[in-house]
Image (cartoon, helix red, strand yellow):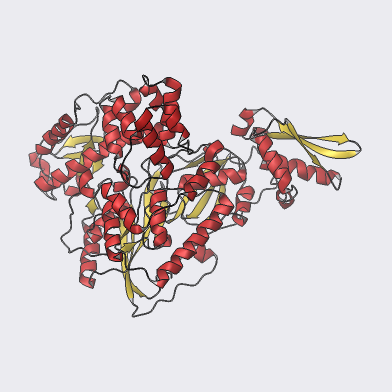
Amino acid sequence: METVEMNSLSLKRPHSEDDVANADEIKRQKTSEKSKTGNNSGQSIEAVTEQSDKSLLEDTKNEIIPHEESEEQEDEELEDSDEDGDPESFADMMKHGLTESDVGITKFVSSHKGFSGILKERYSDFVVHEIGKDGRVSHLDDFSVPVDDEDPSEETFTVLSDEDKQRLEELQLLKNKETSVAIEVIEDTKEKRTVIHQAVKSLFPGLETKTEDRDGKKYIIAYHAAGKKALANPRKHSWPKSRGSYCHFVLYKENKDTMDAINVLSKFLRVKPNIFSYMGTKDKRAITVQEIAVLRITAQRLAHLNKCLMNFKLGNFSYKNHPLKLGELQGNHFTVVLRNITGTDDQIEQAMHSLREIGFINYYGMQRFGTTAVPTYQIGRAILQNNWNEVMDLILKPRPGAEKGYLVKCREEWAKTKDPSAALKKLPVKRCVEGQLLRGLLKYGMKNIISAFGIIPRNNRLMYIHSYQSYVWNNMVSKRIEEYGLRAVPGDLTLKGATAVHIEEGDVDNYTIHDVVMPLPGFDVIYPKHKIGEAYKEMLVADNLDINNMRHKIRDYSLSGAYRKIIIRPQNVNWEVVAYDDPRIPLFTTDLDKLEGKPLPVLPTDGKFRALKMEFSLPPSTYATMAIREVLKMDTSIKNQTQLNTTWLR
């Protein structure tokens, strides 16, 4: 799955009044947002201000949490209610976390001297625009709705009372024992009844309506058309044949990740999240713009959400006959602000020229490996070793470092009793990986860990073994660059179409480092014909794995492998150094600013601080973190950054 993963990276200045004001502003915003959406989770590393340290504990999760509607609200309230420590105690906890060298990230390609800066001091300092497979960059620049005579009237959205909507939602989601809901028609006219019929059917897919007389009064009776099945399949008969089945739109979001956004939209629309499709997931702590498609929801209904959603905007609507597919994109265009930079103009010019001309090592970023004392690659390695007791132990055992209180209690109970039922009682958030595994152990028993682990959603299970592949790849690429530098050498691999071939001695002058790929270990790849090929084998042998037998007896865990370029050269690289006084002032305008007619920020010619504004485009599955790392020459791990930040606060 293509993911834009970008975490906060900062050397922190001492707290100023501006920082505190900014923190208060963010807290007010998040509180307001929660009251509107009831959803606020993600996986990013916050930076600068006391809010940062709270969010670090909330957001840097080792496991991905899948959406389970029945438990979501309770879980969110628990997640948001956790009390977190001060920056000093958080830094102490993060001493158990990973550094870049722990996951093989050790080399740079540029020769300039590094400098410090603050990334994501504000989430609006990091903007991502998706690039579609046709090369078009997604922008939100049009709120208009396609004209369609079949769309319901505006009155459809207001004719039902809040109480009616609540009862209808409970009926739709089968949350009570009622088989129908009766809505009295106060001002009885045929037109009024028609509007109520339309409102129920369009706002609550799966419900049908009929009119009944009761005691001389007219009632609209809503009932299930086809039980639970109707909820998952929006009514086909209500959709015009001439209209494309999918409404495509541009989603502009602030400080929310893609799945959170889709979960919120599905709640407001009262549909299942799986009717939405997208080409890639985008980070939380950023402003992101991407294309989304949804099955048989009108542009009119979607546009209506702009009136009630905070930090989201929907626009650029069109109807098409196809959904979107993961990975069907050319990449992403980034606009990034590094604030309070210390580098000289010469250093910055050298760093940015190197990024544009040479690029950066295409390492898998720290986000790939988790943030706690048990890295995800260790679990992946245990799966590949078929060591299921170790898999269970690594996921459930107590671990030092930053974790929520209820997880700590759950782990302690597990260590003490090895009783899934007792440990599960300590864990109110049942939809996390630990909760899912414990439920699996309850269902299948302690002697069938494979089946118990299988309860965890497939993408989450595969995340672990992909993390191990990434760990091997990072280490091997560092060895390759250390051994042979930034040039193609005989025995390296390059791609001819989709096929990997070795570079021969006589052809080596026809290739550069930008042509070289290296394999992620698997049963369907070949390895370099030089020292690094042997290094792959040695690393897997040390991990009790056979590089020549990467098939697993459970098909899901068989690794076919893949190839990945070792150096990425960003496209469309531009930069500018600007001065500013107030860290709260945005340093560029967003799509939404332009639509709302907000003027460009007025910046001083000689401010207290300097910022580096940079733009670049990257292909899918590359980490913007690693491009920033090459510019700053700083360790991007939470462990290192948190300790640096805390030092500045002393």
Picture quarter with the C terminus: bottom left
For image coordinates 35% across by 52% down, the residue present is 6
* Residue 202 drawn at (x, y percent): 68, 42
Which residue appears farthest toward the right when viewing the image? 216
94 over 537 or under it: above or below: below
Horizontal placement of 396 versus 202: left or right? Answer: left
For image coordinates 49% across by 65% down, the residue present is 25
* Residue 551 drawn at (x, y percent): 27, 24
Horizontal placement of 182 versus 40: left or right? Answer: right
Which residue appears farthest toward the left when viewing the image? 505
387 over 468 or under it: above or below: above
Picture quarter with the N terminus: top left
- Residue 455 shows up from this direction: no
- Residue 124 shows up from this direction: yes
* Residue 613 drawn at (x, y percent): 34, 66
382 over 644 or under it: above or below: above
